[in-house]
Image (spheres, helix red, strand yellow):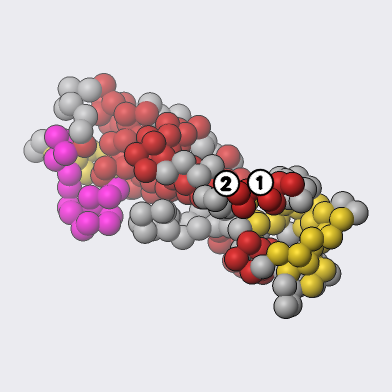
């Protein structure tokens, strides 16, 4: 189901108020969207919400849709802040824009890339999706830090997570680039890894910032 951006924002506001804050309903004025906006009619036509005595209530289908909408939003926050290192108000703004692109299927790929996070950067819960349940059942850790690897194990570099540009440049100069194959040679006393035909030694803190797809 493809909803307008404002309709998704209404569902997000309802989810936070009713599922996380324990309210029985939501006043339309508290969504930040004018009560005459067509988005409210859009949601009622799809039988996702009800408007009773001037207040908003979830229908069962709407609760499910709200759950997935807030999931996409918080995954987008994780992607912007953890992977792209876009933080603060700019990160929040871009996450709000990007979440609407995470349609069915794309959100699962982003979730897997992020190793199925359980909270957003602000500490709010990310509702799990089918990909999370399946990964946990299979013991599939998805993407993990290099420090989670065992000696001799190899994988594909997914991304570097660091706010330090010097660290980023140092790792990139070693060939630590998304898509490259990496093999952990040893993990003690320092981490030694192989990229291509070259081997490099780094400390634990730097190894924690290299995320690898198993």
Q: Is residue 158 visible?
A: no
What residue would you read off at disc 1? 169
Measure how far apart labels 2 and 1 are at the Cα level: 6 Å
Q: Position of residue 52 (x, y in %)?
A: 14, 39
Q: Secondary structure at mark 2?
A: helix
Q: Is 20 in the magenta?
A: yes
Please state, as top left, top right, bottom left or bottom right, where the C terminus lies in the image: bottom right
Find residue 209 and report its image quarter.
bottom right
- 163, above or below 10, in the image: below
Left or right of 91 in this view: 43 = left
Which range of residues does the magenta coloring cover? 15-30
- 183, above or below 171, in the image: below
Q: Which residue shows up at 20% across the image and 33% down it?
A: 32
Find residue 147 and report its image quarter.
bottom right
Q: Which residue shows up at 14% across the image and 34% down it?
A: 29
Q: Position of residue 141 (x, y in %)?
A: 64, 64
Left or right of 93 in this view: 160 = right
What residue would you read off at disc 2? 165
- 47 or 214, which lies in front? 214
- 174, above or below 203, in the image: above
Q: Position of residue 39 (x, y in %)?
A: 28, 26
Q: Which residue shows up at 9% across the image and 38% down it?
A: 53
Q: Secondary structure at mark 1?
A: helix
Badges 2 and 1: C-beta atoms under 8 Å apart?
A: yes
């Amino acid at each position: 189901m493809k909803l307008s951006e404002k309709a998704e924002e209404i569902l997000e506001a309802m989810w936070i108020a009713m599922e996380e804050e324990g309210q029985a309903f939501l006043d339309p004025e508290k969504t930040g969207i004018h009560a005459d906006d067509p988005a409210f009619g859009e949601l009622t036509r799809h039988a996702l919400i009800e408007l009773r005595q001037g207040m908003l209530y979830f229908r069962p289908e709407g609760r499910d849709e709200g759950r997935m909408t807030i999931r996409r939003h918080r995954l987008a926050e994780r992607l912007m802040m953890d992977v792209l290192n876009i933080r603060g108000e700019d990160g929040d703004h871009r996450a709000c824009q990007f979440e609407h692109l995470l349609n069915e299927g794309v959100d699962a790929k982003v979730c897997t890339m992020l190793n199925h996070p359980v909270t957003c950067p602000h500490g709010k819960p990310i509702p799990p999706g089918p990909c999370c349940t399946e990964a946990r059942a299979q013991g599939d850790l998805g993407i993990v830090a290099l420090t989670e690897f065992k000696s001799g194990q190899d994988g594909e570099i997914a991304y570097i997570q660091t706010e330090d540009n010097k660290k980023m440049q140092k790792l990139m100069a070693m060939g630590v680039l998304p898509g490259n194959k990496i093999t952990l040679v040893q993990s003690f006393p320092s981490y030694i890894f192989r990229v291509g035909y070259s081997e490099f030694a780094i400390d634990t803190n730097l190894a924690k910032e290299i995320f690898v797809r198993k």
